[in-house]
Image: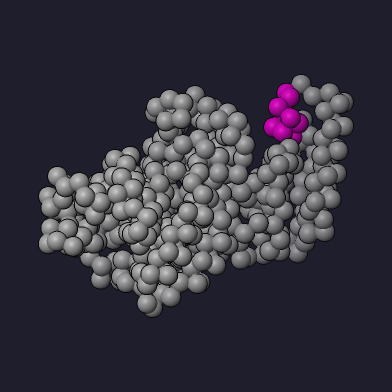
Amino acid sequence: MDSLIAAASRALRAGDAITALKHVALREEPPALALRGIAMAQLGDYPRARDLLRRAARGFGSQEALARARCSVAEAEVALAMRDLSRSARGLDSAVQALRARGDRVNAWHAKLIAIRRALLLGQIDAAAAALRALPMDALPPPLAASAHLAHAEVSLRRLRTQAAALALQQAQQAAGQAGIPALLAEVQDLQAALQRPAARRMQGTEPQRLRLAEVEALFDSASVIVDGCRRGVRVDGQWHALTRRPLLFDLLRELARAWPGDVERNALIGQVFRSWMPDETHRARLRVEIGRLRKLLAPHVRIEASPRGFQLQTQNEREVVVLLPPIDGDHSPLSASLLALLADGQPWSTSALTLAVGESQRTVQRALADLEAASQVRSIGRARAQRWLAAPLRGFTTILLLPAALPV
């Protein structure tokens, strides 16, 4: 390794991409191509970075397996930054094995962290947590330790464990300070700010009360009956009843919960739930059927009693009924809310990557994106396979509770 390549490598390690490019910008040998690719990735030109890394991998040839594995790891990180989640994780696993076999533990750990970040984007929280437990946290160098603590903080936030997340962020800040990389420090500060931003709205009378993540956690730990509009379900005594695929039941429960401890008139329920403002006997019969299904779901913790006007909720031991709504305004479906939460990072996402992240069919995701685009909440750039979706970053609140698999269900 000559002096210019060594100097470029040190600059990249410190996060100084411009200085690295000054050393290797005009060189075409494989090590220089790899360093140029990493520098372009740090500057945000991901397509160019991926092209340079692929050229470098081809240039190293089959006899330099260690260098090829390092290029594969760098390319996987670029693909993650581009939100190209369609790549198989098997290639990254092969690179980890090659790096370990040749004694390059640091890059093997780095590859593991890339796989963990990919799992977090896909909502695979349990897999990410298990992979984090397998990392030797005390042996990681400061940059990797900061990334690992950040991943641990995000796992804790997705599971709504704010104290564990705050502790992990403190450790990430210390490690990022030791590494001296501004981008890492900025990422830690962004996640720390998410703890202080509103994460949900609690309906209290006619005025919503904005709650931070710690307040939502305290509410979930209480004895209250929680009708959760963020995840579309109801939480009673620590048990979660998902109603995502039963929208009529959820709408019915939400209207009854918002009126608690009072009742809701029958025709008002029919209008709000069935969207029919001229009810007849068929609507009333359908309402009785749905009320029966809801009674069966909530028993024995919550009862639905008939009143002279309509129906009302009654709880055991006079428990409070709380309605949580998403922090974003508007009546979004769970899929639309999850798409907005994923796009809130400001990165361009492909339709296929969004499909993998939310776990729905591509056609369903395309319809939801078209509706959001018609409402001017997202925009697309490019066409066909190059099409990407963008949304304005949502600065006023955190979307943790809207992300796929945000809570253990």
Q: Position of residue 334 (x, y in %)?
A: 60, 41
Residue interval drawn in magenta: 269-277
- Is 211 in front, or is 136? 136
Residue ID at (50%, 72%):
134
User: 132 left or right of 261?
Assistant: left
User: 278 left or right of 180?
Assistant: right
Q: Position of residue 133 (x, y in %)?
A: 51, 72
Residue lying at the far front in this picture: please name it. Answer: 63
- Is 341 in front, or is 137? 137
Residue 264 sits above or below residue 402 on the image: above
User: 288 left or right of 368?
Assistant: right
Residue ID at (58%, 62%):
126
Residue ID at (62%, 40%):
360
Residue 140 sits above or below residue 113 on the image: below
Q: Answer with the quarter of the image where residue 237 lies.
A: bottom right
Residue 347 sits above or below residue 64 on the image: above
* Main secondary structure along the magenta-highlighted residues: helix
Q: Which quadrant holds the C terminus?
A: bottom right
Magenta stretch: residue 271 in it?
yes
Q: Position of residue 300 (x, y in %)?
A: 82, 59
